[in-house]
Amino acid sequence: MVIVSLTQFGCGKHDGNEFVGTWKRVSQNGWFEVNIARNGDGDDFYVSHKVPNLGAEGEADKWKIVREPAVAQDGKMVVSGGVPYVITIDKATGHLIVPGAEFERSK
């Protein structure tokens, strides 16, 4: 019984590790960069990207960072921001795919 518990829960492997990191845009559209970070030790994450700050008063605050909560489910990342969306990784290229854009892992 203990062996079964260890094989199911004791590995320390979390869903979503493949998404964690900084990703740079390779497509024409989308954000310039996406950062995905784990929120603590669970299976929830933050997906962060920069957007133009329309209320900027100068060059220093021209961009603002948007952080959206996400969870890893069934090999996908489900982001629950203002408009929910799903992030996947293309198994052929290793690229991160979001609706309308494609990213490669930053080196």
Image (tube, rainbow, N blue to C red):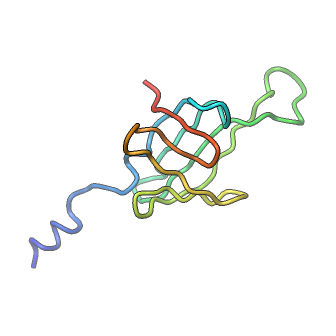
Residue 92 to residue 56: above or below: below
Residue drawn at (54%, 59%) of the image: 78
Residue drawn at (47%, 27%) of the image: 106
- Residue 100 found in image quarter: top right
Q: Horizontal placement of 17 versus 9: left or right?
A: right
Q: Horizontal placement of 41 versus 34: left or right?
A: left
Rendering coords of residue 74 (x, y %): 40, 63
Residue drawn at (40%, 37%) of the image: 93
Rendering coords of residue 80 (x, y %): 63, 60
- Specify the quadrant that holds the C terminus: top left
Question: Which residue is at the far bottom?
Answer: 1
Rendering coords of residue 52 (x, y %): 79, 34
- Specify the quadrant that holds the N terminus: bottom left
Residue drawn at (49%, 44%) of the image: 37
- Residue 69 found in image quarter: bottom right
Residue 57 to residue 99: above or below: above
